[in-house]
Amino acid sequence: MSTGNFDLNELKRRMQGATQALKHELGGLRTGRASASMVEPVQVEAYGSHMPLNQLATVSVPEPRLLSVQVWDRSMVKAVEKAIVDSNLGLSPATEGQVIRLRIPELNQERRKELVKVAHKYAEQARVAVRHVRRDGLDTLKKLEKNHEMSEDDQERLAGDVQKATDSVISEIDQLLAAKEKEILTV
């Protein structure tokens, strides 16, 4: 019997999507070090619409605790500065011509613990997403086996493969979380 229309690679791709989303969310979490991804969510009121900061400026990290935002259009400097202040990132911009410098303040221990909790929440959301993908895959396998489009042995073998893929991705999520937690708690 064939394995029906079951695609393990598609499930793995969907699971990796959860990991990618987690990486993106963790990248936005502020640690004690500067990262260009910290200002990714900043939306600037420019040219009559809201635009992401990275479409109006180049963000670089010249020092570990400093972000440099090079605004391309001189007329947009004030708008970018206002957007950064309004973004609740806790950063205060210092403008020098078309360059906005953002000093990253030290995090106190209480704030670090809060950030770790947020990171754990993000990781749990990613785990749940992976488990949903696993459940979808297992449901598909059961349906195929029930409709006699797949043998019971194939169904069990593929269910094992789905579980291995799930375990692998959840392990990766745990590693990402551990690394981010270490980064946040490092003083």
Image (cartoon, rainbow, N blue to C red):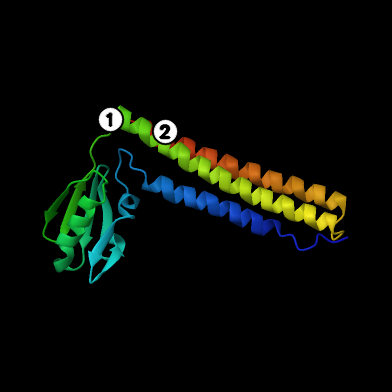
Which of the 4 image quarters holds residue 8?
A: bottom right
Residue annotated with mark 1: 108
Badge 2 marks a residue whose secondary structure is helix
Q: Amino acid at mark 2?
A: Lys
Badge 1 marks a residue whose secondary structure is loop
Q: Amino acid at mark 1?
A: Asn
Residue 34 picture location, percent across and down: 29, 45
- Please identify the residue farthest to the bottom as the structure is shown: 47
- Please identify the residue farthest to the left as the structure is shown: 97
Mark identifier at residue 182: 2
Q: Residue at x 71, y 60 (%)?
A: 7
How many angstroms separate mark 1 from mark 2 (CA)? 15 Å
Residues at badges 1 and 2 in contact (C-beta under 8 Å)? no
Few, some or many residues within 10 Å of mark 1 (<14, 14–19, 20+): few
Residue 155 picture location, percent across and down: 81, 51
Q: Quadrant of the C terminus?
A: top left
Q: Quadrant of the N terminus?
A: bottom right
Q: 125 left or right of 167?
A: left
